[in-house]
Image: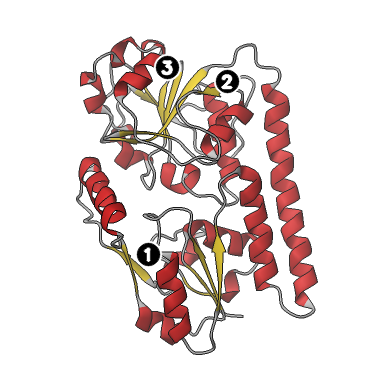
Amino acid sequence: MRIVSLLPSATEMICALGLGDRLVGVTHECDFPAFVRGLPKVTRTLVPTEATSAEIDRLVRERLRTKGALYALDLPALERLRPDLIVTQALCGVCAVAEEEVRAAACTLPGNPRVVNLEPQTLSEVFGAIRQVAEAAGVGEAGASLRREGERIVGGLAARVEAVVARAAGMRHKPRVALLEWLDPPFSCGHWSPELVRLAGGVEGLGQEGKASRPLRWEEVMTWQPEVVLVACCGFGVERTLEDIPPLQSVPGWRELPAVRHGRVCVTDGSQYFSRPGPRLVDSLEILAHALDPEVHPLPAGLPPPVRVSASGVAARATRGNPAVSRSAADGC
């Protein structure tokens, strides 16, 4: 079976199932595991690489208004790759090629490839999507084996989630949390992310479990008075996200927030973790839990600790060695 993935999280699911050797094409954003970076790309972005966060937000809003595309599908590349299975999504209208465009393209491809649409909105639905991919990719006698592998993977992920929940039950205090997935303008987290906060032992008062993220007024954040602010910008890594931190100093009431006064503002990699509803969403839970209470939730080996940004060094960039930014796993957030 020849598989094309049109979503980074789907690529990670396919590889976790041991099907990496069947991947023949991926998106321009697929970068994990590392070997997929060398596979043929079947999409490209129409967002300028130098665009600011505010400009990206305007582009997204325009796309939603006009139903225009932010991502272009390379149909000639798809034709050359001759996939048997195309894995895509319909959850977010701005995060990938539109589902209707994918299905229309599939009708023109040789072999009439199957299109599987993933649309998880909760952690349990992400686990269901892994099973869905295993079912779609399993054919003949290999199908039962692949389904068993899917169950094994889901079982291992679920056990890690249960371990976090068990530890969180011992937390002395459940902090108020603001998990922000955009800063200019501010957006609450959505879908699975508020659930992650609850499982980790926090209280998310701006986003709703299973619901889309939404634009916020900074006044809402100030009213919530979060004790921990974790910034995981959708599609941004830590380095890019830190560029949007300095302007927060001028937001009325920002400096008075408990999270800012006590040095509990952290930045993490939204692109690699929180924005990807795949196997590493459990990594995201463990990173978040560590940020809330590092004594209760030690950071598992191999995971990046959140980058703590102090009130006095909010404009610092971690990669430039500024002492105002801490990456100490012992510190948490």
Quarter in which the N terminus is drawn: bottom right
Query: Residue at (29%, 32%) from the top-left corner?
Result: 317
Q: Residue at x 58, y 34 (%)?
A: 195
Q: Earlier in the sequence, mark 2 or mark 3?
A: 3
Q: Nearer the viewer, residue 100 or 286?
A: 100
- The location of residue 47, given as percent across then percent down, is 25, 57
Visual colour scheme: secondary structure
User: What is the three-letter code of the residue carrying label 1?
Assistant: His
Nearest to the eye among marks 2 and 3: give it: 3
Marks 2 and 3, how far apart at CA: 20 Å
Q: Nearer the viewer, residue 48 or 112?
A: 112
Numbered mark located on residue 293 in the image: 2
Q: CA distance from mark 3 to mark 1?
A: 38 Å
Q: Secondary structure at mark 3?
A: helix
From this view, report whether residue 100 is shown above or below residue 184: below
Instruction: Report the residue marked by disc 3.
Output: 224
Can residue 43 be seen in this snapshot? yes
Q: Is residue 263 visible?
A: no
Identify which residue is drawn at 34% across, 35% down. 215
- Where is residue 281, by image quadrant? top right
Disc 3 + disc 1, Cβ < 8 Å? no
Q: Residue 303: give x, y in percent of width and height.
A: 54, 40
Circle 1 — which element? loop
Q: Residues within 10 Å of mark 2 (few under 14, many from 20)?
A: many
Q: Residues within 10 Å of mark 3 (few under 14, many from 20)?
A: some
Which residue in the protein does label 1 denote?
Answer: 28
